[in-house]
Amino acid sequence: MRKYLVAGNWKMNGTLDEAVNLSEKLAEAVGDYTEVDILICPPAIDIPSVSFCIRNTQIKLGAQNMNANASGAFTGEISYNMLKPFCQYVILGHSERRQIFGEKDAMIAEKARSAV
């Protein structure tokens, strides 16, 4: 039977120092707990540092979004290839991305195909 997945992200909040501090405290609190899978999805700029903080823990790392394209002139975007060394997961189709940025099913499907 598949384990439950508990995921959290902190949107576009906090500084790098706060992300590192939160990740370190979470890693300490989680210890070797394995009853559920735990996933955190920090802002993209914090992913490498958070990855380092949780490197020897059960905590999984994900991104809050990604572009469907592998590379190109997409200012401010992040691709699967950029996330792959750090992340095992990515949040796609989040209600905020749909409501605020107008992402539709077709765009999310394209991102999902790229992620897979």
Image (spheres, rainbow, N blue to C red):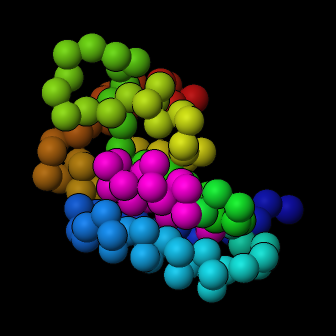
* Vertical relation: 49 (above or below) 101: below
Q: Is residue 74 left or right of residue 10?
A: left
Q: Position of residue 40 (x, y in %)?
A: 50, 63
The residue positioned 48% from the left and 59% from the top of the image is 50
Q: How many marks?
A: 0
Of the 4 image quadrants, the one containing the C terminus is top right
Q: Position of residue 64 (x, y in %)?
A: 37, 51
Q: Is residue 50 left or right of residue 36?
A: left
* Vertical relation: 95 (above or below) 82: below
Nearest the camera: 76 or 55? 55
* Vertical relation: 30 (above or below) 104: below
Single out the residue that lies furthest toward the top.
72
What residue range appears in magenta?
38-53
Instruction: Assess whether residue 48 is covered by the magenta stretch.
Output: yes
The residue positioned 53% from the left and 75% from the top of the image is 24
Nearest the camera: 25 or 71? 25
Q: Position of residue 4 (x, y in %)?
A: 69, 68
The residue positioned 79% from the left and 60% from the top of the image is 2
Q: Is residue 113 left or right of residue 98?
A: right
Of the 4 image quadrants, the one containing the N terminus is bottom right
The residue positioned 42% from the left and 68% from the top of the image is 20
Single out the residue that lies furthest toward the right.
1
Q: Position of residue 17 (x, y in %)?
A: 33, 70
Q: Is residue 94 visible?
A: no
Q: Main secondary structure of the magenta part?
A: helix
* Vertical relation: 64 (above or below) 3: above
Q: Is residue 51 visible?
A: yes
Q: Is residue 74 left or right of residue 79?
A: left
Specify the quadrant of the image occupied by residue 68. top left
Instruction: Assess whether residue 52 is covered by the magenta stretch.
Output: yes
Nearest the camera: 66 or 100? 66
